[in-house]
Image: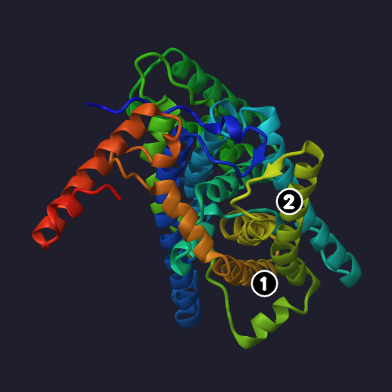
Amino acid sequence: MAAPAPTDDRKHDDRRFLGRLSLPERRYLADALRTETLGGVLLLVAAVAALVWANTLSGSYEAVSDFHIGPAALGLDLSIQHWAADGLLAIFFFVAGIELKRELVAGELRDPRAAALPVVAALCGMAAPALVYVLVNALGNGSMDGWAVPTATDIAFALAVLAVIGTSLPSALRAFLLTLAVVDDLFAILIIAIFFTSDLNFAALGGAVAGLVLFWLLLRKGVRGWYVYVPLALVIWALMYNSGVHATIAGVSMGLMLRCTTRDGEQHSPGEHIEHLVRPISAGLAVPLFALFSAGVSVSGGAIGNVFTQPVTLGVVLGLVVGKAVGIFGGTWLAARFTRAELNPDLAWPDVFAVASLAGIGFTVSLLIGELAFAGDADLTDEVKAAVLMGSLIAAVLASVLLKLRVRRYQSLVAAEERDDDEDGIPDIYEEDNPAYHLRMAEIHERKAAEHRERAQLAGAPRDEADRPA
């Protein structure tokens, strides 16, 4: 007989920061992070391959990256690197748009009170790195153009680091990291749209907007079929690219239009279904290929030394390593203090600082913003990319050390979250208030007791002693 649905036992955690997730949210988180972790490992491999390729066969790397392909008549005669940044990353931002929509209507951001803390933490985690960059460059007479480079967090890369070092975070910390990244992506999109929009082509922009309206109407009317939406999406993307607005805005706009709430008879919303189909393409193909053609920079001793001596690159490194950690931790602590949210007693504030340090891994979006910020200076662009790689590496090492200090605690918490002694597919921790669960466990223990009494008799124990209750 199927086990009854568990009760949502978050009633004790409503005012608790990093408290237990609801079971549906936990399952969604596990599915999403599983794909992101695999994508993050591929991202690491692509980044290493790019560095090796660019530093051993630099001529061929540049030749492939700069090779142009595409219809010039449509304004799409782009280099391979350009296609990766403007084309493939539109898929990444499409998934980010769906994630954001889901968080707003069905996830952690749907309740303004619950959303306040991660949103404040994410905002502080973007403002502090920008401030660090501005201070370093103001003191060193550097360029202010790269202030947005250290503001981004790469969730896939962060999860790949966790996979490599073998640290399994409790679901509450992983959810906090994912929510930070979702809000981070939202503001990164706004930064790209506002500060990195070139001269506008209003005809193309109008066409893109008209395409988005048609996309929304088709969704609202319930029209189905990839053969309708994929060609329309490509047209919208091409028009957005030619409008002067960064083409990735088309991806996030379409993602935000998808319905992410379920209706009667639906097991999953259309947004979740499409995200499930597209996320592997984003994490397993689009982002790694972008990394392959963006992370290939010189890593000679002189280049690495320059990262720590020039104000622009030093600002990026300190922004990612110091600004992110201090901003997210400080914003979280202040928000918890003023909202009177209590930290989950199973965790401690050093855990929050470790996750904040992990968020200093910028990579994908940081590389993109670096390319946009210094588009007219190829040498400085490469130096900023090197700074992003170095800052992300330092943040990863720092976070790894901090997380390893608490790894045994994390392992025990994860084991408790996943324990399912009655084998009904629902973790026991979610059934503590379910009488049927306790009855099933009583039957299990009675069967085990009978089995051990029988073994005791076979081992030679007197019958009266074997039958004696413990």
Amino acid type assigned to the residue bearing label 2 in the image: Met
Which label sits on residue 88? Answer: none
> Which residue is at 43% across, 71% downward?
49
Res. 424 in view: no
Depicted 244 relative to depicted 364: above or below? above
Q: In this view, does 190 lie to the left or right of 358?
A: right
> Which residue is at 61% across, 28% downward?
110
> Which residue is at 57% across, 29% downward?
208
- Helix, strand or loop at mark 2: helix
User: Of 266 and 466, which appears nearest the observer?
Assistant: 466
User: Of 325 and 426, which appears nearest the observer?
Assistant: 426
Q: In this view, does 257 lie to the left or right of 193?
A: left
Depicted 157 relative to depicted 55: above or below? above
User: Of 38 and 352, which appears nearest the observer?
Assistant: 352
> Which residue is at 74% across, 78% downward?
308
Depicted 324 relative to depicted 304: above or below? above
**Gap in Å between the C-alphas at discs 1 and 2?**
21 Å
Q: Residues within 10 Å of mark 2 (few under 14, many from 20)?
A: many
- Helix, strand or loop at mark 1: helix
Percent coordinates x, y for residue 351 in the rendering: 63, 58
Percent coordinates x, y for residue 460 in the rendering: 11, 62
Amino acid type assigned to the residue bearing label 1 in the image: Glu
Query: Label 1: which residue?
Result: 383
Which label sits on residue 126? Answer: 2
Mark earlier in primary sequence (1, 2):
2
